[in-house]
Image (tube, rainbow, N blue to C red):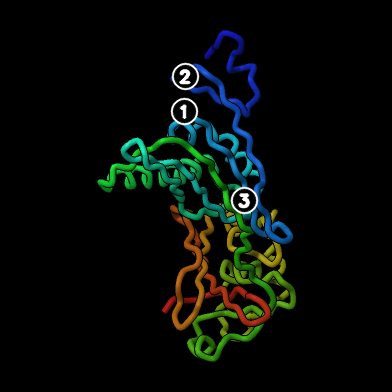
Amino acid sequence: MIKTDRLTFKNLSKKYYYHPGKNEFYKFDIRESESSIKGFAKQYTISGKEGIDEKIFLSNVKPVVIRTLTKNSGIKFNIVLTCEMKKDGVDIIEVPFLSKTEIVLEGTDIIDMYRKVSDKIMESIDTFQMRGSNWRFKSIVKLNINTVIYKPLRGSSYFPLPPYLANKQAIINMKNKDDQCFKWCVTRGLNPIDRQLHQDRITKQLRIQAEERNWNDIKWPTNLNDINKFERNNMGISINVYGFENCVYPLRLSKVGGDTKIIDLLLLSNDVTKHYCLIKKLQ
C-alpha cells in the first residue's frame, strides 16, 4: 500500500490520484463545459496540473473518463488533450492532440477503448516532438471529452424493393405489417421453403418458428448493434448486414466464428423508413 505522511491511498476518494515521483496526491474534477440544445452534443473538461507529464496525466484521469463514458452510452466521442509546448525555453504554444472518434454502445469495452485513444494521443505528441522543430512538452492545459448522440440505422416496416433488386430474384422481401422485419427475415433464413411463391409471407408457421429463438432485449425496430445481442442469445447463428447504393456493400460483418448458420440481410432505406430483407444469394 502506498503511504504518505498523512494519508494512505486506500482511504482516499477515487477522484484522488498519486504521483509517485513527487509523493503527492492530486484531485481531478470533471465538469460539463458545453452542451448543445437538448443535450445532443456535450463537452466535458478536466483541467491539467502543473508538474504532471502527459503519460501520468492520461493514466490518472482514466477512471474519471471511463465513469463519464459509461454513463453516456449510445454516443460518438473523441478526446482532445491540449498541452503547452515550449521551444528554447522562451516560446510557448498550446497544441491540441486529438484521438480518433470512437463509438460507445451498451457492452462496449470502454477500458480497452480508452487505452486505444490514449495511445493515439501519445503517438501524436511523440510525432510532434520528432518533427525537428525543437518543441518539447511543458505542461497539460486540459483534456476535453467531446460527445454526440449516436443513432445507428434501424430496420422498420415493409416497402417494395427497387426494380433493379427485385429483378435479380436473389432477395426475399418479407411482407411484414409491423416493425419486426429483422425477426421475420432471420426466421425465414433459418427456415427456408422450396416453393418460390409465398416465401415473403408472415405465415402462422413462421410465427411458431420464430418463437424457437431468443429475442430478449432486441428492440423493434432493430438497429445494427442489437444484432450482437441476438447472436449472444442464439449460439450458432452469424448475421451479416449489407447496404445498397449502386452496389452492395457491407454494413456489419459477424465476428462469430466456428460452424455457424450464416444469415445475410440487406438493409434498405427510403425517405420514410428502413427495412431488412433476406438475401438468398450474394451476386
Q: Is residue 193 above or below residue 28?
A: below
Q: Amino acid at mark 1?
A: Gly
Q: Is residue 51 above or below residue 219?
A: above
Q: Which residue position is annotated with label 1?
A: 51
Other residues around mark 2 within 10 Å, as few (<14) / some (14–19) / many (≥20): few
Q: Where residue 43 is drawn, which disc sits there?
A: 3
Q: Which residue position is annotated with label 2?
A: 22
x, y percentage for residue 130?
28, 44
Whether residue 243 appears in this view of the structure is: yes
Q: CA distance from mark 3 to mark 1?
A: 25 Å
Element at label 1? loop
x, y percentage for residue 190?
57, 66
Residue 50 falls left or right of residue 152: left
Element at label 3? strand
Q: CA distance from mark 2 to mark 1?
A: 9 Å
Q: Residue at x 51, y 59 (%)?
A: 238
Tell us which disc is closer to us: 2 or 1: 1
Q: Nearer the viewer, residue 211 or 172?
A: 172
Q: Amino acid at mark 2?
A: Lys
Element at label 2? loop
Q: Earlier in the sequence, mark 3 or mark 1?
A: 3
Q: CA distance from mark 3 to mark 2?
A: 31 Å
Q: Pointer 2 and pointer 1: residues touching (CB < 8 Å)?
A: yes
Name the image quarter holding residue 211: bottom right
Q: Residue at x 53, y 36 (%)?
A: 48
x, y percentage for residue 231?
57, 55
